[in-house]
Amino acid sequence: MRFYFIWVCFTLFFACSENRQPIQKNIRKKTEVPNHSNMLQDESFKVFVKKFHSDKHFMESRIAKIVTGFNSDDHIVDDTITGAYKWDKQDIIFYMREVNDAYKSIKYIKKYTMLSAKEQEEYIYIPDSGCFYKCIFQFNEKWYLIGFIVNRL
């Protein structure tokens, strides 16, 4: 009986240690350090947004050729919406000063939503008011502003 008990313990010990080795190999594969050169090429959205709102030249370089959206100052005529609105680059730069101030202000709330695998929405607003700014960014090798909505009080 004693021999049988020792044999069972011995078998279980080696059976468990044999199965443990592939698991350890898998763990090592999953914890590999990412390649930093690839990370620099594929900028994260968080890093992009921070730089977009703090560096004017960077922001200007990341505005797409065609930006659609809405401008409450310019878009409503006689309380009706008059078709699709296409932004002029100089108008975007002008309004982005306000957006950048709102981005830095504690008075505004910032909310980020993933619209698709390559699109993110930034929503900056004052709670319980009609004042908000929406920026829609699309990733095409780099992040670009493709949609812009301004609704001021």
Image: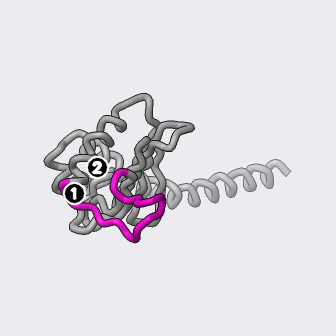
Question: Farthest bottom residue?
Answer: 83
Q: Give the residue at x 30% y 66%.
A: 86
Q: Residue at x 27, y 60 (%)?
A: 144
Give how far across and how far down residue 97 sits, in percent: 25, 41
In the picture of the structure, the residue carrying the numbered disc 2 is: 48
The amino acid type, in three-letter code, at marker 2 is Phe
Pick whichever, 87 or 72, lies toward us: 72
Spatial separation of the CA atoms under disc 2 and disc 1: 10 Å
Q: Earlier in the sequence, mark 2 or mark 1?
A: 2
- In magenta stretch: residue 111: no
Q: Residues within 10 Å of mark 2 (few under 14, many from 20)?
A: some
SS class of the residue under badge 1?
loop
**Do the residues under discs 2 and 1 have CB atoms within 8 angstroms?**
yes
Q: In this rendering, would 21 be left or right of 147? A: right
Q: Is residue 127 left or right of residue 61?
A: right
Q: Residue furthest right?
A: 1
Q: In this rendering, would 123 be left or right of 23?
A: left
Figure check: 71 above or below 111: below
One can see residue 65 in this view = yes
Q: Position of residue 75 (x, y in %)?
A: 37, 59
Q: Which residue shows up at 53% across the image and 57% down it?
A: 23
**SS at badge 2:** helix
Name the residue type under label 1.
Answer: Arg
- Say if 122 sits above or below 103 in the image: below
Residue 145 in which image quadrant: bottom left
- Foreground pick, 45 / 54: 54
Q: Which residues are magenta?
A: 73-90
Looking at this rendering, what residue extends furthest in the top direction? 106
Quadrant for the C terminus, please: top left
Judging by the rendered image, the residue that carries numbered circle 1 is: 62
Identify the residue at horizontal 31%, vertical 35% (top origin).
Answer: 101
